[in-house]
């Protein structure tokens, strides 16, 4: 029989009454149980597996742990599903599988997703209004760091949290004056504001870094750098990364459930109407605009009811402004 199997006989361990035939992976056993070769004592360690025989009674505790672990893994093997398919691509001529990838499983969303921590404040009879900016809508409600009995929106909480992290290591701006702080990817242990972090993404990961697909470097202004999902985590420029994502979507046979197209401008999004299906970016944008029109949303500055994206107004708390007015306000702030 295969050498990867070992027969474990009964050695007086409580609850063991019959020999069990199990497949043992030596490396996995040592990692899972934290056992070294010295702890296994007389266990014979082979490259293809582990054979255990003649272990003294003083080794019963280690043997019991090993036996229980192998039995649990044996049961897991019986119900374990097929390993996920990996799409491998090393050249342009290689054909990608047309079957959908098993590793991209979809978890259906709720039809009416609940706002995080909304029920927590309702149970306490607290009005759901941000105690800082007076916003009434947010992705989650959080306790105010200064007044824990009052709620704040996610954006204001991010600003409060950023204020506790000092100054940005790039621009020197205080955390309380930023929209959020992140850990710097280039300076270990330092914090960087969100605006500088986006600029940092455009910087090459290291000196002399080039795109693995097109060969462009930092001097060619390639945009944001990404890790490849098909090859062994090599670096790609923004354009080549988008092409790679399209290759993966095409191999999986992705199509928009609403318009039927098999191409999209940049990314595929999950459909809210058909669980498990995808929609293109154009249909997603049109759906968001239709939802806003149905709700009667208008811009608090120019009065339009059509935009690609709605933003919260800083001048009028609780009101919305269109994307055009939002960009104008951002440009004015930058000039000031």
Image (tube, grey):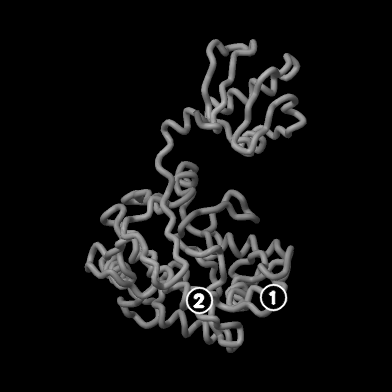
Q: Secondary structure at mark 1?
A: loop
Q: Nearer the viewer, residue 180 or 12?
A: 12
Q: Position of residue 218 (x, y in %)?
A: 61, 83
The residue tagged 2 is 213
Are dots 1 and 2 in contact, CB under 8 Å?
no
Specify whether residue 30 is in view: yes
Q: Quadrant of residue 44 in the image?
A: top right
- Is residue 55 found left or right of 123 in the rendered image? right
Q: Secondary structure at mark 2?
A: loop
The residue tagged 1 is 173
Q: Quadrant of the C terminus?
A: bottom right
Specify whether residue 297 is in view: no
Q: Residue furthest bottom?
A: 335
Q: Which of the two labelled residues, at mark 1 and mark 2, occupies the earlier sequence position?
A: 1
Q: Position of residue 156 (x, y in %)?
A: 56, 63
Q: Position of residue 213 (x, y in %)?
A: 50, 76
- Is residue 279 found left or right of 57 in the rendered image? left
| CA–CA distance in space, label 1 to label 2 | 37 Å
Q: Residue at x 56, y 71 (%)?
A: 235
Name the disc covering residue 276, or none.
none
Q: Residue furthest front?
A: 1
Q: Position of residue 224 (x, y in %)?
A: 54, 76
């Amino acid at each position: 029989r295969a050498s990867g199997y070992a027969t474990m006989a009964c050695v007086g361990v409580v609850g063991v009454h019959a020999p069990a035939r199990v497949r043992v992976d030596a490396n996995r056993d040592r990692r899972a149980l934290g056992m070294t070769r010295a702890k296994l004592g007389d266990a014979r360690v082979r490259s293809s597996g582990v054979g255990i025989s003649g272990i003294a009674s003083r080794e019963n505790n280690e043997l019991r742990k090993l036996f229980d672990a192998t039995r649990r893994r044996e049961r897991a093997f019986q119900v374990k599903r097929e390993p996920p398919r990996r799409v491998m691509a090393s050249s342009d001529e290689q054909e990608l599988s047309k079957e959908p990838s098993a590793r991209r499983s979809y978890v259906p969303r709720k039809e009416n997703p609940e706002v995080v921590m909304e029920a927590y404040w309702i149970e306490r009879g607290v009005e759901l209004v941000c105690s800082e900016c007076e916003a009434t809508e947010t992705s989650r409600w959080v306790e105010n760091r200064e007044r824990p009995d009052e709620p704040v929106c996610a954006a204001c909480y991010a600003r409060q949290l950023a204020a506790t992290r000092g100054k940005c290591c790039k621009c020197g701006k205080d955390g309380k004056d930023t929209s959020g702080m992140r850990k710097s990817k280039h300076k270990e242990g330092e914090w960087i504001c969100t605006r500088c972090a986006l600029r940092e993404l455009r910087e090459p990961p290291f000196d002399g870094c080039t795109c693995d697909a097109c060969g462009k470097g930092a001097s060619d202004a390639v945009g944001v750098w990404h890790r490849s999902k098909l090859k062994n985590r090599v670096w790609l420029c923004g354009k080549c990364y988008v092409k790679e994502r399209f290759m993966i979507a095409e191999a999986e046979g992705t199509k928009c459930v609403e318009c039927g197209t098999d191409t999209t401008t940049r990314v595929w999004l999950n459909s809210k109407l058909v669980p498990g299906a995808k929609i293109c970016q154009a249909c997603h944008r049109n759906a968001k605009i239709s939802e806003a029109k149905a709700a009667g949303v208008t811009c608090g500055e120019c009065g339009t009811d059509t935009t690609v994206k709605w933003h919260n107004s800083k001048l009028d708390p609780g009101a919305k402004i269109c994307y055009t007015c939002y960009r104008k306000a951002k440009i004015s702030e930058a000039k000031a």
